[in-house]
Amino acid sequence: MLDDFFSRAIIAGIGVALIAGPFGCFIVWKRLAYFGDTLSHAALLGVALAFLFEVNITLAVFGVSACISIALLMLKRHASLSSDALLGLLAHSTLALGLVVLAFMTWIRMDLMGFLFGDILAVSKTDIAIIWLGGAVILAILFAIWRPLFASTVSHELAEAEDMNPERANFIFMLLMAAVIAIAMKIVGVLLITAMLIIPSVTARRFSTSPEQMAAIAAGIGAVSVAGGLLGSLEWDTPAGPSIVLAATIMFILSFTAAPLLRMRSKMKSNK
Amino acid sequence: MKKKPEPLISLHNCGIYRSNRWLVRGISFALNAGEIVTLIGPNGSGKSTTAKIVLSILKPDEGSVNRLNKLKVAYVPQKLAIDWTLPLTVNRFMRLTGKTSAAERHKALTATGVAHLENAEIRTLSGGEFQRTLLARAIARKPDLLVLDEPVQGVDHLGEIALYDLIKQIRDDFGCGILLISHDLHVVMAASDRVICLNGHICCSGAPKAVASSAEYKELFGARAASTLALYEHSHDHTHLPDGRIHLHDVTIAEQLSTNESQPENNLSVANTAPEQTDPKELPHAR
């Protein structure tokens, strides 16, 4: 089954969607959308450095994103710039630096579009192994820090006062985010990762009554978007990454009509 | 009540320095188990800052803090900003920082009079209901030290008195130390053992009545504030809970009272009566 490029794409894509679900929820709850964007823009610098030093791309992207996370934490504590100005600065200067470094390396012929918008149809068996094994480790760590991380999402001071050590949980979360971006980049590309994180989560919100449920539903919606987007791209010969994001968007729009209907039905049931 | 010889927490000459000025300085006090201490002062006088030193959210830039080993703290913050995207029910919120059994959660919510809201979403609560939920979460934690930052925000006057009575009840039941923050001495008077009057430093401290009649307090809040205090000193033998039941101070909650007997009082005190078991046809959204 893994010999078929299309099944490989679906398996890899669904793996990424399952990881992106819970992370996307935290991004939305903590209002970190721009942070996710910044990390993924910086990923391109990781790609450039990987070519320059001939190291593994996923590792290089993780390294650069992790450095950016830490830099952000430090700058936030000391600098007087507002955090979205800071994010904008880091996002685009790292993206620009990445593009410039790539342009200097004239001996490398690479498909820039693949990194910007993803190259899901070219995933290898190794990529699948990285996504599923790496994803399992990432989700296991997220699960371990879930309680303090969630407590600090609701109220940082409350978590701190009641000895939850939210600072540590947030730091680990940022490193995990860097890992998620390194893994997801291959599937949807650096420019669309944030969409993959956010859209399924906000769609899931309408159907959820608890944070844990929302994370699970977001993962499910993400998986359906991947399948739908890939089938669509096969059918109409459209680029795979953007098609997946569009499929997620369509599900988001549908949720506007579906959620009230569901609520009406459950109300009718409870009144019977 | 058992008394521990050592205070739960003591501050020694603590100060916090931010952006070229001292927010608070020279703060020294101790808090014992079973004691209710109220921090009072005008806006910007450093009440919350002092509370944050106690909660070890802020590290003092000068002075030192002694905390009892393994002190279990519960915090009722002034407000929480909960995003629309976050689905959070009262019940889930109760488990935010520690595991508690469903029975414990229910008991705490009953004590603060919001048990009927157990499955409601936090965002939909009114100000008063939310404060009671915050308080219930703190109680369920069974803390040694309870810190409450303006716990009566958004609560109407009757509810305010009820909440302070409840806070006193919590102290009596659990024997925990309580640090209360208020900008209004009136209603906290009856519930406090000691009042610390802040204005960047400790202006005066002592028994509530002594503070209220002190020259420093009058200077800080004006003579009128001090003279209206008598109004609030009467005692209550019962309070009305937001769900329509009555909270007697010798018993915990009087559910056995028939609704007919207590109806006139109910109508007076609460508008949003939401009993737990209502006939479905009485619900407005039944259809």
Image (tube, coloured by chain):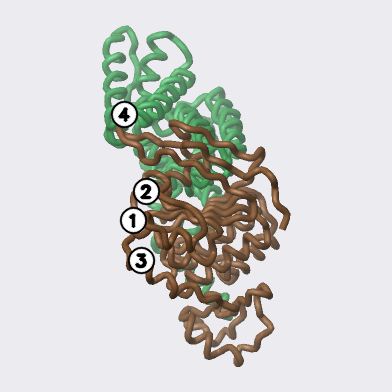
Chain colours: A green, B brown
Judge from the rendering whether residue A118 lies leftward or rightward of residue A2; answer left or right: left
Q: Secondary structure at mark 4?
A: loop
Residue B273: image x %, image y %?
Answer: 51, 80
Residue under circle 4?
A79
Q: Which mark is residue B225?
A: 3
Subunit bearing disc 3: B
Real-space Cα distance between discs 4 and 1?
37 Å
- Is label 4 on the same chain as label 1? no
Judge from the rendering whether residue A99 lies leftward or rightward of residue B216; answer left or right: left
* Relative vertical location of residue B107 with respect to residue A28 in this rendering, above or below: below
Q: Quadrant of residue A27?
A: top left
Q: What residue appears at the point 60 percent right and 29 percent down from the top-left corner?
A: A133
Q: What residue appears at the point 43 percent right and 48 percent down from the top-left corner?
A: B48
- Is label 3 on the same chain as label 2? yes
Residue under circle 1?
B220
Real-space Cα distance between discs 4 and 2?
30 Å
Task: Look at discs 3 and 4 and give the one toward the viewer.
Answer: 3
Q: Secondary structure at mark 3?
A: helix
Mark with earlier residue (3, 1): 1
Task: Look at discs 4 and 1 and give the one toward the viewer.
Answer: 1
Question: Residue at the right extreme?
Answer: B2
- Is label 3 on the same chain as label 1? yes
Residue under circle 2?
B199
Residue B141: image x %, image y %?
Answer: 63, 53
Q: Is any atom of residue A13 visible in this view? A: no
Q: Look at label 3 and name its amino acid.
A: Ala
Q: Look at label 2 and name its amino acid.
A: Asn
Subunit bearing disc 2: B
* Relative vertical location of residue B96 with respect to residue B213 in this rendering, above or below: above
Question: Residue at the bottom extreme?
Answer: B260
Q: What residue appears at the point 31 percent right and 28 percent down from the top-left corner?
A: A79
Q: Secondary structure at mark 2?
A: loop
